[in-house]
Image (spheres, rainbow, N blue to C red):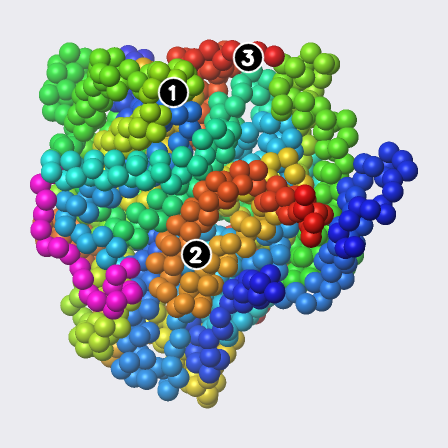
Amino acid sequence: MIDQLIFSAEVFLNGLMTGVMYALVALGFVLIYKASGVFNYAQGVMALFAALTLVGIQQGQVPFVHLINAIFGTHVENFGWNVPSVLAIILTAGVMVLLAILIEKLVLQHLVGQEPIILFMATIGLAYFLEGFGDVMWGADIKTLDVGLPQGISDTVEAVTAEWVGYGFFIDRLDIWASIIAAILVAALVAFSQYTKQGRAMRAVADDHQAALSVGISLRFIWVMVWSIAGFVALVAGIMWGTKSGVQFSLSLIALKALPVLMLGGFTSIPGAIVGGLIIGVGEKLFEFWIGPLVGGATENWFAYVLALLFLVFRPQGLFGERIIERV
Amino acid sequence: MLYREAGDFKTGYRADGQTFPIRLDRWGYYILLAVAVLVVPFLINDYWANAVFVPFLIYAIAALGLNILTGYAGQVSLGTGGFMAVGAYAVYKLMTAFPDISIVIHILLAGGITAIVGMLFGLPSLRIKGFYLAVATLAAQFFLVWLFNKVPWFYNYSASGQITAPTRTVLGHAVTGPATSAPAKYLICLAFVLVLAWVARNLTRGTSGRKWMAIRDMDIAAEIIGVNPLTAKLSAFAASSFFVGIAGALLFSVYLGAAEVGEAFGINKSFLVLFMIIIGGLGSIFGSFAGAAFMVLLPVLLKNLLVGQLGWPTDLAAHIELMIVGALIVLFLIVEPHGLARLWALTKEKLRLWPFPH
Amino acid sequence: MTKLRFAALVAAGLMAAAPALADLVVPNLSYRTGPYGANGTQYADGFNDYFTLLNERDGGIGGEKIQVPECETAYNTEKGVECYESTKGSGALIYNPLSTGITYQLIPKVSVDKIPLYTPGYGRTSAKNGKVFEWVFNAPANYWDGASVAIKYLLDENGGDLNGKKIALVYHNSAFGKEPIRTLQDLSAKHGFTLTEIPVDAPGQEQKSQWLQIRRDKPDYVIMYGWGVMNQAAIQEAANIRFPMENFIGIWWSGSEVDVTPVGAGANGYKALTFHGVGMDYPVYDDLKTHVIDAGKASQDGQHVGSVLYSRGLYAALVISEAIRKAQEIAGTSAINASQLRDGFEQLDITPERLAELGLPDFGPEIKMSCDNHGGSGMARMQQWDAEAGQWNLITEFTEPDQEILNPLILEDSEAYGAEAGITPRDC
């Protein structure tokens, strides 16, 4: 019995950590939804694209190398240099800003005022496009992403817990780093939106497009900015998940892990994304630990959604979402 | 002249409410039907059946189903893949348990079973709306796929969990199983499509359809004018799932012949069908067909064009195909957010006035 | 007019381009995109390159050039069906779709169309029984062979006794991953080890629960049946919990470079099964270099030459080409058709001498097929990853699986299929 309790505690802690990883992905969704009412399905693919670009820049890959070789019959392979991680991250962030500008110019601008589902579909189209584009640009191989983040069991945690509870807990050092980075990211986002002019403008737009326009806030600038920030968040998520299991197509599927988090936390709340992530992470891990063996395991994929659904039945707008007010 | 209402004098409500008010449309429809029933079966070969016609017809049924739910009743669902899986597994269990009963009955029953499951998962729609509901239906998607993967009873305890459709016949011709001829596959799907499209058309223009649309446009207002949201929403889920279930049953038994739930009925199916109705046009029967045709034909077309005609390497072609599909979707939404059906309607409007627009 | 032209273009686009009928056509249903694209692309390259080599060096097989039209399936069953139908008309001799899902789809179809299906190391295991599955071949080894060889290897390591040992099976929660369960259950009853089954849902990037469980239960060995991102994630998590890598054994689909390199040094010592050799220390690579790679004819510029999955694709092409040769011999004509190729497969005998002659000494096990045995001997060997050198090393010879356990299982499953599909087993 006491064993079960200790194990549960370990599972709980790891659930929290996993939750942070989910929340990192969910954060990007929330930012965009809040500012532009777009449910951006492409967030997962953006994380993939960012990670691909990062690795590509780091390792000096020639973009579109396969296409170039196929068309011109050349045998270009590599620039043959290695870019330091920090510089590569900055350059990738620049690429994400460029992407945001392009998305605003080519897609969003033409879809102003459309119904939410149309915008949602447009982002799925965008996801398809980026997926193909990323592959053409950087190739479909599995890439190793290494920006110097540590991985593996944390000895300190293991030693401390072994002393205190008699069983060394497993905590991944990467997860600890992810939590720290997530905390910094959220703090920075909150500070940005509370204390800067652009941040206030962003909140104004989130509150009411029309009113924001009427006081002279440029919607287009805000949208580019929000998509850029979301692109940066995607980069961070891409780095974390890419370090975990290599940069490859499946990275884009983490979006599916973020959806229940969003649902539970509410589409419009940044704290909601974090708390939702934690609840989902802990919930699915504990369920897998307690109930999983009874029903054959591999429950995590659906249980996250069912858990979120249960919360929704009681709070249809998510835990921290804005109350939905309907007028007839 | 050619495309005119002049001369079509209506003398009753029935005539006023007919589906094809213009004579030329009506003829076009009859000719299309005649070609589909009398000409195509004699020309069709395995490639055309399996790569183009059968998937188109089956997805048209699924799109009709989802359009009832999303287009007419306004409830966005991403659970289509899961509901198709229910249809597929239901028909598999029925086929193997009662081999002597006609497959047609099994397929209809599979639709019925899916309708019940759909209603069950439709219950949260009474509380949850919009994107929250869309994401909530993903719970159905993932749970159902997991269930069929996990419980051996559903796949008759086979070693790998794959289900394979045995041979069943209709009027002496095999319609499922490996020995099915291309025309038989095509005709059985066509028969279902024709009947179901007729049902869908009449459902949506009748009382139930009007209730659904009232709920879609504003559920509180609808409630005030006397539409019961409980029955309206659940009946939409039931009708929609019935269609989707039949599509799933046909997809497994007639088209694929064997299926593995996670692969054949995964989340991608849900998105694909949703694409169809949005590209085709929400709340339109014609749109369901147009969208299904678009999404089935476009990849085949692009692939043959890029690989077959231009001779590109397949991987490059596949990546660029993804890019083109994505870009086209965005383009379509920008040009005409209401889909191909709306585009078609606009063309018809123009045609009516041609050559003397105001 | 424009409409008409557009319609003509659409119709033309929908018609698959048919290659010239004179050659031998071996379609390559590959996947270079989608979740498993990174794996599929290497396999497809090896498959293409071997046939290119035969064409360039020997002028084809028996004087007949071989055409390898490629069709992208993206590991998707519906696209697989489309590819099958579009290439079938061009006189395809054989199919090798590299996907268990597509294989299941094609098994009934090829039986009717009378085209052989060759699924080395994947597909439906019980297709080994040629009495029921007339058109399907899965030599040299199948999933159940793999499970049995892994256990045999562990038996050897433990002096022939696995009593009281704990073995965990981490598997891809799909048709492929579930294959070995029944075999392992029977083997656990025979050898007295306890088996824990741990499913991982696709895609499987997040496996914390599973590996926490392994860390708690402390199994002596972990066997993995994984594919795609699941492999990298699992090996990473194993390294994270400091599971001893030499006690971690993957099936051959979890044992390529792409699975271990993202983990870096942590993956050192990880073992995987294989049914063919690895590396480029084979004479055939000299020919490949002269005739294919340096001539600029290599698939994708030869960037994956020598990798595990490349070798596997090459090996599949080799077995097919040998079967074609055999079929030409039996039929007495070089322009064979699909059913003649089946006869060639059923009488295929690839001896070690023949392999050496082909420039691949000791590359694969001896394959001897017959009318009732479509699966060969089922032999496989173990390889181990050396992270520092960045290469796989073969650590055992080819080992035979425990046929005593496997044969009844294969008979049972194939007969169940036969009964359900209404096939009367033929006499052999």
Residue at image location 56% in from the left, 58% down from the top: B51
* Amino acid carrying mark 3 in the image: Glu
Q: For this view, does C163 lie left or right of residue A35?
A: left
Q: Is residue A321 magenta?
A: no
Pointer 2 residue: C73
- Which SS class for mark 3? loop
Chain under label 1? A
Which residue occupies the foreground of this view, B352 or B44? B352
Pointer 1 residue: A213
Decide which of tag 1 and tag 3 comes sooner along the chain.
1
The location of residue B239, given as percent across then percent down, is 68, 32
> Does the residue at mark 2 contact the one at mark 1 (Cβ under 8 Å)?
no
Q: Is residue B70 visible?
A: yes
Pointer 3 residue: A326
Q: Is residue B84 visible?
A: no
* Amino acid carrying mark 2 in the image: Thr
Q: Is residue A84 magenta?
A: yes
The span picked out in magenta is: A67-85
As measured in the structure, the alpha-carbon distance from the residue carrying label 3 to the one carrying label 2 is: 47 Å
Up the image or down, B357 lies above or below C120; here it is above
Residue A46 placement: quadrant = top left
Q: Locate the N terminus of chain C and report the quarter of the image it occupies.
A: bottom right
Which mark is nearer the camera, 2 or 1?
1
Chain under label 2? C
